[in-house]
Image (cartoon, rainbow, N blue to C red):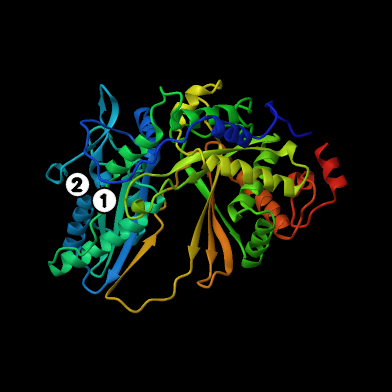
Amino acid sequence: MGIRSGVVGRGFAVATARAEAVCFPVPPAVSLEPRPRPAHVPLAPAQERMWQAAAHGCSADWNVARALRIRGAGVDVTALRGALELVVERHEPLRTRYPVTEHGPVQQVLDVSEVVLDIAVRPVGRDALDAEIADLAARPFDLTRDPPLRARVFVLGPDDVVLALVVHHISVDGRSMTPLTRDLVTAYLACHTGTPPRWEPLPVTYTDYTLWKHAQLGEFTDEWSRATHQLRYWANALAGRPALLEFPVRQRSMSASDPAAGALIPVAFDAATHAGLLRLAQDRRASLFMVLQAAFAVTVGAFARCADVTVATAVSGRDHRLLDDLVGNFSDDVLMRVRLDRAADVDELIDQVRRVALAAYAHPDTPNPRLKRCLPQDAALPLFQATLVLQKSTRAEPTGAQAFSVTEVPTGVIRAKHDLEFGLTAHYENHGAPAGVDGAFLYPLARFDPATAARFVDRFRAVVALLADGYRGPLPPLLATTGRRAPSPRRALRALA
């Protein structure tokens, strides 16, 4: 049984990007700064997909749940509630709704006096905490009417509470949790002592960012605009690809009443494997992410028996220093089409992934719903089915004792919006040495049984281990491998035949 190859024109998509860069003028620079607010503020490009999903009844699938456990002498629940109100006042996306107007969906920032926060305080036993958080996260938001935030303060004991936050993804992304948590702690300390929070004013708002982004991109009706240029790139790069990868899914699907219900499989690579991947990345002038994405593309291709695979990753979208401290949704997915049949060996594969990734990073602003409308495939089909996200973490030095501690705890809420999804974190010692990569594989229970998902993870682990061990040969052994050591190419080719 061989690997099926899709149909596509010759040359990598990045060649198209370079050719268009010569033909299209570079627009003048636009400054990110406070701006006058028009009567109607459009959605930011990163928000369009979430809004469309909510409009089609899938709002709860995009709920982001976080739980912060606060322990210490005399935890002040009243101050905690007041702190949350101050944070909502500081960050506009937490008090924004998204109604439909004659201009389409818009952002409508509520005045603080108009906001009625869904916050409740209740005692709960530790055994019931996960169920309480899951219930909180499962309820959809009406984005056209309500602020996209609800919270519960679960009191486990006099010196032990859990603050559960559920925010719709249209208003928050993963990197928002750092400024959100930091500002919450600052506000809590201020409320506890009865003083105003001492934080620096935000230089810009999310509305300023949205208007700046649209000014940069221009209109899709303008054939010379950056928006049109990016859309044209993606339409060319994805032309002729397989519309749907065929995975070995369940013969009898589970109930479709909750198709996004998911499960996790932990994944971890030790420091030695991490170091081996970094050596390969350095040798090929690539990044650790590009090496892992190459391993992921190989695994997806073997799983689907297809040599033309489109995988995705998330980009932060915070491409200006003034955005670092904002809470909001800046991130979006970019696609990487990888042709396994055009790489003779590992070196060529990583070189291809590097070029495709850099081209994708250069075209990050095309909303997925608009791109779907420009492709010949059925709009009901997903734009991609497999995604890998890699984050970086440096182990911090221990800090001195404080009156209370704030730690993030698992929520137990697992939602799978894609078929195959890795969320990985690369850890480094404080002096920069690799300390390992870990994370989880997330999959929908309606699509895959646990044994099939485990086989996919095992194959990915094996491919990563081979690359870290220095394997640089042809791809068929990677596509066939089931163990740590690479089989001979001849044996692997026989297995694929």
Residue at image coords 34%, 52% = 322
Q: Can you give x and y, in whole percent of width and height, for residue 441 in the image?
A: 55, 49
- Disc 2 residue type? Leu
Q: What's the mark number on residue 81? A: none
Q: Name the residue under label 2.
A: 117
Q: Name the residue under label 1.
A: 151
Tell me if 52 is positioned left or right of 395 in this view. left
Identify the element where label 2 is drawn.
Answer: loop
Q: Can you give x and y, in whole percent of width and height, for residue 144 in the image?
A: 25, 32
Q: Is residue 364 above or below residue 374?
A: below
Tell me if 263 is positioned left or right of 322 in this view. right
Residue at image coords 78%, 34% = 2
Task: Place residue 80 in its image quadrant.
Answer: bottom left
Residue at image coords 33%, 57% = 179
Dot 1 or dot 2: first in sequence order is: 2
Which of 226/121 is in front? 226
Q: Can you give x and y, in whole percent of width and height, for residue 55 in the image?
A: 35, 28
Identify the element where label 1 is drawn.
Answer: strand
- Disc 1 residue type? Ala
Residue 295 appears in the figure: yes
Which of 47/224 is in front? 224
Tell me if 297 is positioned left or right of 51 in this view. right
Residue 139 appears in the figure: no
Dot 1, how many residues are within 10 Å of its Cα: few (below 14), some (14-19), or many (20+)?
many
Mark 1 touches mark 2? (CB < 8 Å): yes
Distance from disc 1 to disc 2, alpha carbons, whole Å, reads 8 Å
